[in-house]
Amino acid sequence: MRRYKLNKEEINEVLKILGSLYPDAKSELDYSNPFELLIATILSAQCTDVRVNQVTKSLFPKYSDPYKMEELNVKELGEIIHSCGFYHTKASNILKTCKILIEEHKGKVPSNREELVKLPGVGRKTANVVISNVFDQDAIAVDTHVFRVTNRLGIVKADNVEDTEQELMKKIPKPMWSEAHHWFILHGRRVCKARKPLCDMCEVNHLCIMYRKSGLQKI
Ligand code: SF4
């Protein structure tokens, strides 16, 4: 009989290996305060971190808080962030977010998820990125890499990012949530790539359900 999910010991082994492979894993977005991380994360939707960093390199020195950013109009901001894609929607959401931060939060980024997800352009994933990276709260931000890697490995078996997050929170010890999220992202970018995963050189292939199901190693 075949199993389709990893057991607790196997999950712990995966986490141990990934932790040793990516000991310094952290966000690859450049930022120097919570506001910059929030804006960079909004910009990163459907865009690479490398591209976002190129854009924010010129954006943040001039507009590093909501008061300064709000001086721009949608057209002006859209021109600056153009290369990130969906620039009109992102510019509009960012400026609406700045207005709310100024009017309701004294220009600060709220530190709780409930308030963050009320901001335009901010979903649960973005909120989790912010609270885990700058407010030291335990959270697992499930993006396309985390979704793909954890489902392929067999840590979870879920159809969408919401269910993946819920399953991961049950399977992974809470103090590891933030770190593990970075490990899965890096593993997804470097090894467990979307189109052509590099399974033969993957350090956790002996545990991976997808790899084992492929027939290379029976389970
Ligand atoms: S063995 Fe392949 S599918 Fe499994 S985690 Fe590694 S790269 Fe991804």
Image: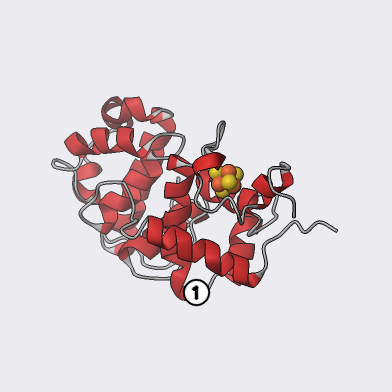
Instruction: Name the one closer to the observer, 77 or 142.
Output: 142
Which quarter of the frame holds ligand 1?
top right
Position of the N terminus, as image quadrant, is: bottom right
User: Which residue is rendered at x = 39% and y = 44% of the image?
Assistant: 42
User: Which residue is rendered at x = 59% and y = 65% of the image?
Assistant: 11
Q: On the image, which quarter does residue 57 sit in?
A: top left
Q: On the image, which quarter does residue 216 sit in?
A: top right
Q: Amino acid at mark 1?
A: Lys
Please indicate, yes or no, whether residue 145 appears anywhere in the rendered image: yes
In the image, is residue 12 above or below residue 153?
Answer: below
Percent x, y of residue 128: 45, 60
Please indicate, yes or no, whether residue 113 appears anywhere in the rendered image: no
Instruction: Name the one closer to the observer, 210 or 27.
Output: 210
Q: Is residue 92 left or right of residue 205?
A: left
- Mark 1: few/some/many CA within 10 Å (<14, 14-19, 20+): some
Q: In the current view of this chain or complex, which residue is farthest to the front?
A: 217
The mark tally for this picture is 1
Q: In the current view of this chain or complex, which residue is farthest to the left?
A: 61
Percent x, y of residue 13: 54, 66
Q: Secondary structure at mark 1?
A: helix
In the image, is residue 215 above or below residue 15?
Answer: above
Q: Is residue 53 left or right of residue 15?
A: left
Say which residue label 1 marks.
174
Percent x, y of residue 86: 43, 29
Instruction: Name the one closer to the observer, 82 or 214.
Output: 214
Q: Is residue 42 left or right of residue 152?
A: left
Position of the C terminus, as image quadrant, is: bottom right
In the image, is residue 18 above or below residue 159?
Answer: below
Instruction: Name the one closer to the observer, 176 or 142.
Output: 176
